[in-house]
Amino acid sequence: MSGAVHRALRIGVVTAFPPGRNSLNEFGLHLVRHLSRLPEVGEVVVYSDRTDAGAPEPMPKVSFRPCWRFNDPANVLRVPREISRSGPDAVLLNLQFASFGDKRVPGALGLLIPALLRARSVPTLLVLHNLADNVDMKDAGFAGSAITARFLTFAGRVLTRCLLRADLVALTIPRYVEFLRSSYGAENAILAPHGSFEDVATPSFTVPPGRRTITAFGKWGTYKTVDMLVAAYQELLRRGYDDLRLVLAGTDSPNSGGYMSAAAARYADVPHVEFPGYIAEDQVAGMFLAASVVAFPYTSTTGSSGVLHQAGEYGRAVVLPQIGDLVDVIEEEGFRGVYFAPGDPISLADALAEVLDDHVKRTALGRRNFAAATGIPMSEVVQWHLAHIERLLERRARR
């Protein structure tokens, strides 16, 4: 490295952050944690979301500047202003298309922040977890009609061009990088591994004693719904599987307030169905390790699946729908699972039975997913991000 970047750096990170529950908060936590451990980094300044959950827990070498709220149109002014006041050497943004809001105006305005930072000559690296071009706007709850969905897809392309104003745009799916380069001419689109959240020890691949557990985890109510999975679970009960339980963990999607409480009431009479709600970080490991199989009852996807990576970290077998991005992740990142036809509870029941009934296959899938999820830990991914940031700073120093 040249002498232009030789001191310890102050790196800003724009992200949702625990104890808030906005999208990508867990990814933001582990990104910041590992970034702050690098000797080249003197301080990480987190421009986090303001929520009613309280302040983030203190971390060494990390300062917090809560400066934005979900669905607040003023975020587009507040975040760049706070960054200007605190003056980091570079800013890393951890975003997806609904990071700043599920309402169209505040959500769209927030996505202008990378372009505004670039206009202020702030070196920016954007970690982008999905693309508007690959989101089914109606299925994901952003549009109520096909006409509105087409309009939002067009608006999404405009916002994508704004996001591409960042110095670098890192994506975790190779096909996304190829798409941005071919469709938008984005030479600044680069591939970044998702990374495993922790340097985890090899888990037990055996099923815990007691009832065999089918687990699903996410933000529910749009393209992730519990109804098809409950129907598949009921089908297994009818087939004589009398030692099962179903754990439906997680909270409502921002677009579907009240969905999980309504589902819990709707299925109150189904035996051994549990709705534990939000899973705190220190409870995630126990939830996955108690699972015999992790199910993904999705009808579409909006990008790389953090839940899939977590299931892999804990050596769990998975059942997945044969749809777009999830299949790409499976094939490109080395994961394996049993597939089912999207929207078909009988097909989902068959896939679950295939995993539950075959100990050898279940163990093999768990081992393969563990290898895929832990191949590149987050501790190495942040070194990759920092190397790109250092090169940005060196180029600017030479200019």
Image (cartoon, grey):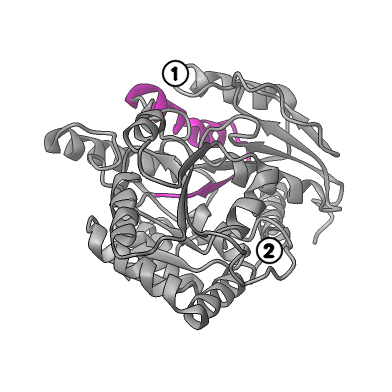
Q: Verify whether residue 113 appears in magenta.
A: yes
Do we see residue 175 in this rendering? no
- Residue placed at 53% from the left, 80% from the top? 364
Bounds of the magenta segment: 104-130
Measure how far apart labels 2 and 1 are at the Cα level. Answer: 35 Å
| Number of numbered discs | 2
Q: Name the spot of residue 84 as percent of width and height, x first.
A: 67, 25
Q: Is residue 141 left or right of residue 389?
A: left
- Residue placed at 72% from the left, 29% from the top? 56
Residue kind at label 1, given as amino acid type: Pro
Q: Is residue 332 left or right of residue 390?
A: left
Q: Nearer the viewer, residue 215 or 393?
A: 215
Residue kind at label 2, given as amino acid type: Pro
Q: Nearer the viewer, residue 23 or 352?
A: 352
Do we see residue 246 in this rendering? yes
Numbered tag placed on residue 85 in the rendering:
none
Residue position marked by numbered label 1 in the rendering: 73
Q: Name the spot of residue 342 as percent of width and height, x first.
A: 25, 59
| Residue 292 higher or lower than 390, as above or below | below
Toward which corner of the image does residue 226 lie, by quadrant?
A: top left
- Residue placed at 84% from the left, 39% from the top? 61
Q: Is residue 347 left or right of residue 377?
A: left
| Residue 44 higher or lower than 101, as above or below | below
Q: Is residue 24 left or right of residue 374?
A: left
Residue position marked by numbered label 2 in the rendering: 377
Q: Verify whether residue 260 appears in magenta.
A: no
Q: Element under label 2?
A: loop
Callout 2–callout 1 Cβ contact below 8 Å: no
